[in-house]
Image (spheres, grey):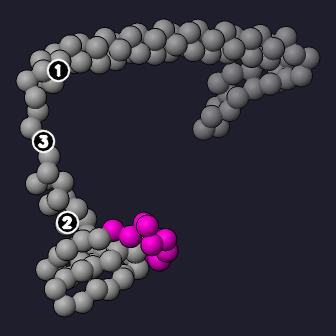
Amino acid sequence: MSVKIKNAETEKDFDFFGIALSSEDLIILEVECRVSPRKSFEKWREVVESTSYPWLSKELNILPELKSIVRSQTENQLRQMEVEAIQNTRILRENEHRYLQLMELSPVGFFTVIHGRIIYCNSEAAQQLS
C-alpha cells in the first residue's frame, strides 16, 4: 500500500506491505509525525475515534426492537439446533441397531476385545469359541 506523506518541507511515497497501488489509490495525509506500518493502525484509530458521530435518539429508540429481533432469531436457531440434535441422536441409535443386527446375523464370527477381555461377540463367534 503506498501512502504519500506531505509536510511543509518534503513530499515522499512509502510502500507498505509491498503492495503497489496506482496514483489514484494514494492516500494523502498531512502529518507531523513519522508514519510506519506499526504506527499506522494507531493513527487510523485516532482518526476514527475523533470523527465518530454520537447516536441519534431515533437510533437509540430502535435498539430495544433490534434486541428483541436478534433474541427471537437466536432462540429460533437454538430450537432448530435442538431438533436437529434429537434427530441426529435418533439416526445414530438406528444406525447402531442396524450395525449390531448385521453383526449378529453375519455368518462370520465377530468379537470385541478391550484390555484382554471379550466384551462382545456375535452368535457365530460364540459357537466358534465354545
Q: Quadrant of the N terminus?
A: bottom left
| Membership of 114 in magenta stretch | no
3 vs 1, front mark: 3
Q: Please, is residue 76 above or below residue 23 in the view?
A: above
Q: Name the spot of residue 7 as percent of width and height, x first.
A: 19, 83
In the image, taking residue 8 as reference, residue 3 lies left or right, namely right
| Membership of 18 in magenta stretch | yes
Q: Please, is residue 6 above or below residue 126 in the view?
A: below
Q: Using the rendered image of the protein, determine whether residue 105 is visible from the camera's viewpoint.
A: yes
Residues 88 and 104: in front is 88
> Magenta region: which residues?
17-27
Q: Using the rendered image of the protein, determine whether residue 130 is visible from the camera's viewpoint.
A: no
Closer to the N terminus: mark 3 or mark 1?
3
Q: Give the amino acid type for the residue marked by disc 1 in the picture.
A: Leu
Mark 2 is surrounded, within 10 Å at the Cα level, by few (under 14), some (14 to 19) or many (20 or more) other residues, namely few
Closer to the N terminus: mark 1 or mark 2?
2
> Which element type, helix, strand or loop, lies under badge 2?
helix
Q: Which residue in the protein does label 2 denote?
A: 42
Q: Which residue in the protein does label 3 denote?
A: 53
Marks 2 and 3 sit apart, C-alpha to C-alpha, by: 19 Å
Q: In percent of the image, x 31 and y 74: which residue is there?
A: 37
Marks 1 and 2 sit apart, C-alpha to C-alpha, by: 30 Å
In the image, taking residue 77 as reference, residue 43 lies left or right, namely left
Q: Which residue in the protein does label 1 denote?
A: 63
Q: Name the spot of residue 72 as percent of width and height, x first.
A: 31, 11
Q: Give the amino acid type for the residue marked by disc 3 in the picture.
A: Tyr
2 vs 3, front mark: 3
